[in-house]
Image (spheres, rainbow, N blue to C red):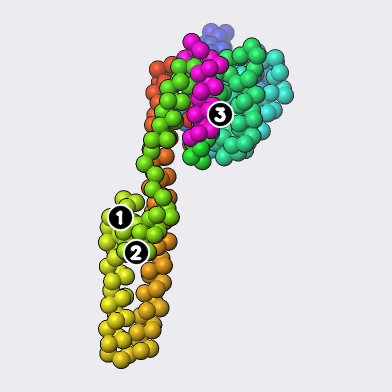
Amino acid sequence: VIILLASGLAPAAELELTDAGQLGFAEELLARGEFFKAVLEYERLLHFFPSSPLADDAALGIGLAYDGAGEYGVATATYRQFLADFPSSDLIPKARLALGRSLALGRDYADARLELDALASESPPVESSGRARILAGLTYLPTWELDSAEGEFARAAADFPGAPEGALGDELARIAARRTELPRISPGFASLASALVPGLGQVIAGNFWDGVLALTTNALWIGATWWAAEEGEIPAAALAGFIGAGFYLGNVYNAGQAAEEANRRAVAALAGEITLSVRRWEAENGTGLTLVPSP
């Protein structure tokens, strides 16, 4: 009986719950993308080991898991609670960076920039200061404000010379500066061109087949109006002319919109180049928390 009892205790000892084991399991779930399961395991650690030296890792992990799940409002609240509960933790810089990133992911760009600027302006700089300045610049990409993004990248280059973040800031500032070289089509000019020759503005904006369609449609309605008038069908001519006028005005409006869309595509391509450079830098430098503020 004693031998049987002893053999039964061995597996139980092997299954003993530890804070390190619990944290490792939660982090494994987080890495696999099982975010809500990770939250439960992090919370289990905090429940069973409230005084563990790993409690701050678990509390921060909860925020990261909610971020991964797209629950940015909950993640933001979790990070703020972390900062209040663990004011002396070594993870404070990472939590502040994660807070700024989560606000950006939730499209609260103004508050994100406030948090990131405060972190980037720490004197002396802390671990995440340089990345915070880069991330502050990246928050301008979704709104196409490349001039403001360039300013933040240039500050990173100036404030962190010799650091990897400084080199990245210099590279991104040079890319953003190329915004002045982007081809720009005046929406007013495109609209005027289509007012003179239907479809011409769309062709200028790079939408060749839209231009052909606009020209063909307007030509057909003009022809229909002329034919009805020649046949003495005045009511039909008036109706065709009224409908044709609608297509003509729509053609003029569409040309301006096509020009604006062409300008946005050019800016988006440059913003995409910036994002690609950041991802390449992260792959080379092994940062755990991606700086790109997009889901």
- Mark 1 lies on a secondary structure that is helix
Say which residue appears at 64% left-offset and 11% top-offset: 124
Q: Over which residues does the magenta segment extend?
A: 146-164
Say which residue appears at 53% left-offset and 28% top-offset: 151
* Magenta stretch: helix, strand or loop mostly: helix
- On the question of residue 67 being in view, the answer is no
Residue 160 among those drawn in magenta = yes
Task: Return the residue at label 3.
Answer: 136
Tell whether 193 sits left or right of 123.
Answer: left
- Decide: few, some or many residues near mark 2? Use Cα within 10 Å; few <14, some 14-19, many ≥20: few
The kind of residue on which mark 2 rests is Leu
Residue 182 x/y as whole percent: 38, 38
Q: Which mark is residue 72?
A: none
Q: Is residue 88 above or below residue 31?
A: above
Q: Nearer the viewer, residue 123 or 263?
A: 263
Where, by quadrant of the figure, is residue 250 drawn? bottom left
Q: Nearer the viewer, residue 131 or 217?
A: 217
Residue 135 among those drawn in magenta = no
Task: Return the residue at label 1.
Answer: 203
Residue 71 x/y as whole percent: 57, 38
Of the image marks 2 and 3, the number of the one nearer the N terminus = 3
Labels 2 & 1 near each other (Cβ < 8 A): no
Task: Return the residue at label 2.
Answer: 196
- Decide: few, some or many residues near mark 3? Use Cα within 10 Å; few <14, some 14-19, many ≥20: many
Q: Nearer the viewer, residue 244 or 283?
A: 244
Of the image marks 3 and 1, the number of the one nearer the N terminus = 3
Say which residue appears at 69% left-offset and 23% top-offset: 83
The kind of residue on which mark 3 rests is Ala
Total numbered circles: 3
Of the image marks 2 and 1, the number of the one nearer the N terminus = 2
- Decide: few, some or many residues near mark 1? Use Cα within 10 Å; few <14, some 14-19, many ≥20: many
- Mark 2 lies on a secondary structure that is helix
